Image (tube, rainbow, N blue to C red):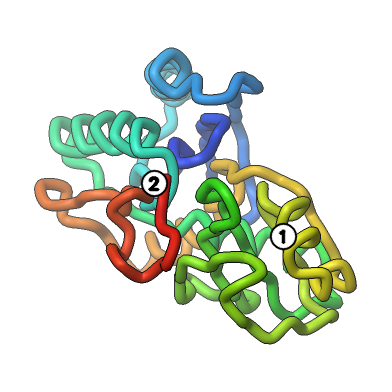
Amino acid sequence: MLLLIESAAEYPSVVLSSGLGKHDWMRESLDKQSHAECIPIFVQEALEFVKDNGFEIKAIVINKGPGSYTGLRIGSSIVKGICYVSKIPLISVSGLTAQGNWALKNIPESKQAYSMLDARRNEVYFSEVNINDLDSSLKSVILGEDKFEVNPKNIIVGNSNVKAVELVPELANCERMDIPLHAKFMVDIAWLKYKRKDFEDVAYFEPMYAKEFIPGLSKKFTI
C-alpha cells in the first residue's frame, strides 16, 4: 500500500492505494483550509485501516507543492515524522503534474493539459503536462499579461479555470475540468516513482512553499 496525502490544496485528502489506478481507501474534507483538523485524523484512520487488514505501507507520498503554506507545513511534518520513525520511504509528487495526468487519462483524445493552481489575483502556478509525465515544468503566470501559446485541443484543469477563461479568452476553446487537487491524482505517478526507487531524503526534504516559489519571477507576485 501507498499512503498518499494531499495537503497543498484548499481541501485536504488522504488515500491508500494498492496499485496503479487504484485508490482502495479515501478520506477527504469539503471544508476549505481544514488541514490542521483533518489531516492528522485521516492519517490515523488510514494507519488503523492498514493495521486492521494486515497490509503494509511501502511508502508515503505527498504533494511537494506549490500550494498552501500552512497545509504543506502540516503535511510534510506528519509524513517526515512517520517516515523517520517507521523507516518508510518518502515520495514527493508534483500536484500539478499529477492533476494534468489524471485529466488526460479521463479525456484521452487530448494530448496535453494546462494544469493551474490559483495564486491569488490574476496569478496562477502553471504547468504544461503531457500524458505519463512524472514531472513537468512549472512557472508563475500573470493571466492576461504573460504570453503563452494556447492549443485548443488541450485541457485546462484546476481551480483557476473561471478567471483563466475570463483573462485569456482563447482558453475557452479548450476542454475544461474544474477540479481541486486531490490525493487520488498522485496514485499512478507515485507507483512509478516507487518502482524506480525515486525517494526523498527524509531529513532534508522541504516542500515548495508558494510564497517562496522562484522569487522575483512574477511581476506582481503576491500570495
What amino acid is labelled 2 in the image?
Answer: Val
Question: Residue placed at 19% from the left, 31% from the top?
Answer: 81
Quarter holding residue 85 = top left
Residue type (three-letter) at the residue carrying disc 1:
Ala
Front residue of 60/57: it is 60
Residue 36: image x %, image y %? 39, 18
Badge 2, how many Cα within 10 Å: few under 14, some, many 20+? many
Left or right for 125, reference 202: right
The numbered dot on residue 164 is: 1
Disc on the earlier residue, 2 or 1: 2
Vertical placement of 133 versus 25: above or below?
below
Q: Residue furthest left?
A: 203
Label 2 element class:
strand
Where is residue 211 shown, x and y percent of the image? Answer: 33, 49
Q: CA distance from mark 2 to mark 1?
A: 29 Å
Q: For this view, does 135 lie left or right of residue 132? A: left
User: In the picture shown, does residue 166 fall above or below 145?
Assistant: above
Q: Residue at x 51, y 60 (%)?
A: 125
| Residue 4 visible within the image | no
How many marks the image carries: the answer is: 2
**Is residue 134 in view?**
yes
Task: Name the residue beneath numbered marker 2.
Answer: 61
- Residue at 52% in and 30% down: 12
